[in-house]
Image (spheres, rainbow, N blue to C red):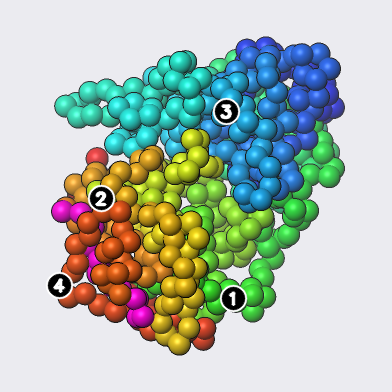
């Protein structure tokens, strides 16, 4: 039996120049940071490996403490990076080094949907011709817009996604990028190289990355927390078989996630009492999240995104409705309580931890009932920007799974503030009080980056709602309509006059529920679930 356990430094020397390196991670969750650090240290000492193309379906590392991709952010080491998202964190912290390289055009950077990137890995493994999909049409991924390019260096490099005609319809084609090296992570490795993931908060697409590298003639390096004797991992607990693992690197200090050494509730080994989740403090953020929660239906499957929407699970707990919906987050957790902060992407008390590529298949095909997401900007067509800050010439964290999730979702609820730049608002006595108006309109003639196409959604007949602190809007074939206004707010002065675009007003305009604007639980009632029937319109 060949010895597979080697040092991180030895593994780093196995990465050749000009290789495509696939990294399994989701921000600070499952990040093989120890191994990435070793590659960066080798480059510092030897100036090798050089010219790498990094392929990362979700962000590798973040700004909080696990550095991830920043270990590789050295001129000459990375030539191109293709990622679903990029490290991000509080604006009070310095930008990651990878962002400096992107904005300085030291690396050609692309941002593609995370689910599509996992599809590309699977197609590379099966030696297929690349991904053919409608996910990303009419968004910034479409080559008629940006083609996923993040900077001038990528624009000079050229397109990595093509618009094609097939069977009389328009599709996007994503050619494969076969990896020569896959760097993945698990919890325990036996001597043969079988990998279990019992302490991980997600399993992500580690198998898919390993399959792609192995089938394309490359190598697979797996970082783990510990090792055990051959044959001691129960068969059904082996997540990655030894046939897909070439080398094992051990990091005994491996953290479960950023700033989280180990929490057994995240990996599903224990269940936290619901009483242990602190109620969300009363704020206008909470007002918005409460109103978003009112769009949910009993017994529905709901995807949850980052931002204000992430507060909704704690609101349901506070309202005694914790089991009313089943959450499904892109990293793979199904059910339980999705977590925020350092643990975002994990869930406590999950019913299951589904492989991320399969979770994205579920999203891309529209198998779920609703998604709660955020917005930076909304335009006259109802299109949404979440992937580029209007005031900065580069992306924020990127699109992640946003494009995959919104492509065929039956119902979408986007949450955010109506204006930005100095906005000061308060909720009290059942009303909203605007103390200082924001200087920046967030409802604009044209979004700076189309992460979601409102025009395409209207054509598909998707149910789209936009929830803000002062009003609720709906998207129809003729644009945006205000359907509710907060108590204490003037429709003319605080809504219509503050939007950067004309807004329609519903003839049956309603006042937002006053209970939203008071600190006590509001007695939340969800909508009745509509019985699911066979929908042949969603077969393509």
Residue 333 placement, left or right of 439: right
Mark 4 and mark 1 lie on one chain; the one further toward the N terminus is 1
Q: Callout 2 environment at 10 Å: few (<14), some (14 to 19), or many (20+)?
A: many
Query: What's drawn in magenta, residue-wise?
Result: 478-489
Magenta stretch containing residue 367, yes or no? no
Marks 2 and 1, Cα distance to the nearest angstrom? 34 Å
The mark lying in front, picked from 1 and 3, is 3
Q: At 27% across and 64% down in the image, what residue appears?
A: 496
Mark 3 and mark 4 lie on one chain; the one further toward the N terminus is 3
Image coords of residue 270 (percent x, y): 69, 65
Image coords of residue 516 (percent x, y): 42, 79
Disc marking residue 137 = none
Secondary structure, mark 4, is: strand
Q: Which residue is mark 2?
A: 380
Magenta stretch containing residue 484, yes or no? yes
Mark 2 and mark 1 lie on one chain; the one further toward the N terminus is 1
The mark lying in front, picked from 2 and 1, is 2
Mark 2 and mark 3 lie on one chain; the one further toward the N terminus is 3
Q: Which residue is mark 4?
A: 507
Image coords of residue 86 (percent x, y): 57, 38
Q: Quadrant of the C terminus?
A: top left
Marks 3 and 4, Cα distance to the nearest angstrom? 48 Å
User: From what the image shows, is residue 46 above or below residue 494?
Assistant: above
Image coords of residue 195 (percent x, y): 70, 38
Q: Which residue is mark 1?
A: 281
Answer whether residue 145 is visible to the viewer in this image: yes
Secondary structure, mark 1, is: loop
Viewer-proximal residue among 150 and 195: 150
């Amino acid at each position: 039996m060949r010895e597979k356990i080697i040092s991180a430094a030895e593994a780093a020397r196995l990465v050749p120049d000009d290789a495509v390196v696939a990294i399994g991670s989701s921000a600070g969750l499952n990040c093989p940071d120890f191994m990435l650090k070793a590659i960066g240290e080798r480059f510092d000492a030897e100036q090798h490996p050089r010219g790498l193309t990094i392929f990362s379906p979700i962000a590798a590392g973040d700004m909080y403490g696990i550095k991830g991709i920043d270990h590789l952010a050295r001129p000459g080491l990375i030539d191109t990076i293709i990622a679903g998202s990029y490290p991000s964190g509080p604006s009070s912290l310095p930008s990651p080094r990878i962002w400096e390289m992107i904005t300085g055009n030291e690396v050609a950077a692309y941002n593609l949907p995370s689910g599509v990137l996992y599809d590309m890995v699977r197609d590379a493994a099966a030696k297929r011709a690349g991904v053919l999909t409608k996910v990303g049409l009419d968004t910034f991924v479409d080559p008629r817009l940006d083609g996923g390019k993040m900077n001038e260096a990528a624009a000079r490099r050229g397109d990595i996604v093509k618009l094609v005609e097939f069977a009389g319809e328009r599709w996007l084609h994503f050619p494969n990028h076969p990896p020569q090296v896959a760097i993945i992570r698990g919890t325990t490795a036996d001597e043969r190289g079988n990998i279990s993931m019992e302490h991980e908060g997600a399993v992500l697409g580690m198998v898919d990355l390993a399959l792609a590298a192995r089938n394309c003639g490359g190598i697979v390096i797996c970082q783990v927390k510990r090792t055990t004797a051959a044959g001691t991992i129960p068969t059904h607990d082996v997540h990655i078989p030894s046939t897909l693992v070439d080398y094992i690197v051990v990091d005994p200090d491996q953290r479960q996630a950023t700033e989280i050494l180990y929490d057994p509730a995240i990996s599903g080994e224990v269940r936290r009492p619901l009483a242990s989740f602190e109620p969300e403090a009363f704020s206008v953020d909470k007002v918005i999240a409460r109103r978003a929660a009112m769009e949910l239906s009993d017994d529905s499957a709901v995807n949850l995104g980052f931002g204000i929407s992430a507060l909704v699970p704690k609101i349901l707990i506070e309202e005694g409705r914790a089991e009313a919906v089943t959450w499904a987050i892109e990293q793979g957790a199904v059910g339980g309580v999705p977590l925020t902060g350092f643990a975002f992407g994990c869930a406590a008390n999950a019913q299951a931890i589904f492989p991320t590529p399969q979770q994205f298949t579920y999203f891309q095909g529209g198998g779920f009932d609703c998604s709660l997401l955020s917005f930076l900007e909304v335009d006259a067509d109802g299109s949404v920007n979440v992937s580029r800050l209007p005031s900065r010439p580069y992306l924020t964290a990127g699109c992640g799974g946003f494009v995959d999730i919104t492509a065929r979702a039956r119902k979408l609820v986007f949450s955010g503030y109506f204006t930005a730049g100095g906005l000061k608002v308060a909720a009290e006595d059942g009303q909203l009080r605007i103390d200082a108006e924001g200087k920046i309109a967030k409802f604009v003639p044209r979004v700076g980056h189309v992460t979601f196409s409102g025009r395409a959604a209207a054509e598909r007949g998707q149910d789209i709602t936009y929830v803000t602190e002062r009003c609720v809007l709906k998207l129809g074939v003729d644009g945006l309509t205000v359907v509710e206004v907060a108590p204490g707010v003037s429709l003319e002065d605080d809504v219509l006059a503050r939007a950067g675009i004309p807004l329609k007003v519903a003839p049956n305009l309603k006042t937002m529920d006053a209970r939203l604007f008071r600190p006590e639980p509001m007695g939340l009632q969800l909508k009745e679930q509509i019985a699911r029937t066979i929908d042949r319109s969603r077969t393509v």
